[in-house]
Amino acid sequence: MSQIKTIGLLTSGGDAPGMNAAIRAVTRAAICNGLNVKAIFQGYKGLISGNIVEFKSQNVSNIIQQGGTILKTSNIIQQGGTILKTARCEEFKTEAGRKLAYETLVREEIDALVVIGGDGTLTGARIFASEYNYPIVGLPGTIDNDIYGTDSTIGYDTALNTILDSVDKIRDTASSHERLFFIEVMGRDAGFLALNGAIASGAEAAIIPEISTEVDQLEEFIKQGFRKSKNSSIVLVAESEITGGALHYAERVKNEYPEYDVRVVILGHVQRGGSPSAYDRILASRLGSASIDALLDGQRNVLVGIENDKVVLVPFSKAIKNDKPIDPELIKVLKSLSI
Ligand code: F6P
């Protein structure tokens, strides 16, 4: 018999569409199984300070369709006279911070945690779980889709659709003016949004951190497109220190090939907002329910992911240590279809 009577639930890191659907699923699946739910606001910061509210089923009514996270993730850090805001909790990175977090869990009689977030969130969970031998289950919530062990992360599909909506619109003006657009998308250090966004929008190329792209190769590619009577070109660039971002490429192309009329769009945080897609709502609901099943089954320190449309449990050690690879088939598809 499971010893777990009360679970704590938090979201941390960058918000992602579908996090609310996951919060709803975890809460209701837990209640359905006779557990109490304590919602921790402001991520790890709220765990340290004890910003906690008991959740009943009605606390998660009418949120499945909402973007963002009702539990918030941000915290305010004060340094001298300046207030700095960050979504990532620095205090939880310290032993002293994690000790305070543990004390909160003991005080609140929380027996296990479900954390929803990206790589940083899961890394924090892994360290905490091993330091205190504490049961934690993680759900992958990030638009970046960069978590190993799951085919998709909660929020990725919605962000991809937001990108498509914007690129389709930019294509209208790009072809009217015969322009070359560099469109920068998010992804931190991963190229999933850029590559799949490029395939789905019919873009001419994607520049991603996983593969180096020289400007002259890119230019050759674009030139071929123009020669074959294309009247616009769109290149999706993944934000990253490795790619240098869209402005970097645009500047280089402008300098070396002044005949092109180049424009840059940085999509930014618009990609993180909006109502989650059907796919993300279903994914969040399935993974949220499975997180409670996993805890009641005695599972500890695992990520609940999806592989080949089946729910899978991946040890934190594996999910965090490995980089999720880009499928070379996708690169081939983009290349062959953008001629
Ligand atoms: O990890 C999600 C993400 O949106 C990344 O794609 C992006 O690099 C980062 O968060 C932006 O973080 P912030 O909202 O703190 O600027």
Image (cartoon, rainbow, N blue to C red):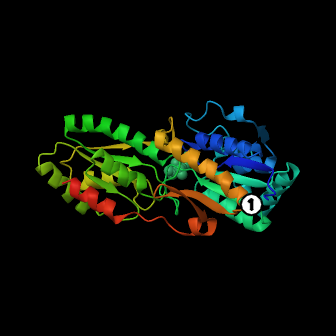
> Along the horizontal axis of the image, is 80 left or right of 68?
right
Residue sitting at x 68%, y 60%: 124
Residue found at the very far front of the displayed protein: 1
Q: Is residue 34 above or below residue 316?
A: above
Would residue 197 appear left or right of 119 to someone viewing this image? left
The percent coordinates of residue 225 (x first, y second) are 17, 51
Residue 326: quarter of image: bottom left
Task: Name the side, left or right, on which 313 lies relative to 222.
Answer: right
Camera-side residue of 114 and 103: 114
Query: From this viewpoint, is residue 178 visible?
Result: yes
Q: Position of residue 159 (x, y in %)?
A: 45, 44
The residue to which callout 1 is attached is: 135
Q: Is residue 90 above or below residue 231?
A: below
Disc 1 residue type?
A: Pro
Q: Is residue 73 above or below residue 334?
A: above
Residue 324 in the image, given as x and y percentages of width and height = 48, 64
Residue 210 occupies which quadrant of the picture? bottom left
Quadrant of the drawing holding the N terminus: bottom right
Q: Residue at x 34, y 44 (%)?
A: 264
Q: Nearer the viewer, residue 163 or 97?
A: 163
227 horizontally vs 186: left or right: left
Bin the neighbour count of mark 1 within 10 Å (Cα to Cα): few under 14, some 14-19, many 20 and up.
many
Q: How many marks?
A: 1
Residue at 32%, 47% (x, y): give it.
200
Q: Quadrant of the C terminus?
A: bottom left
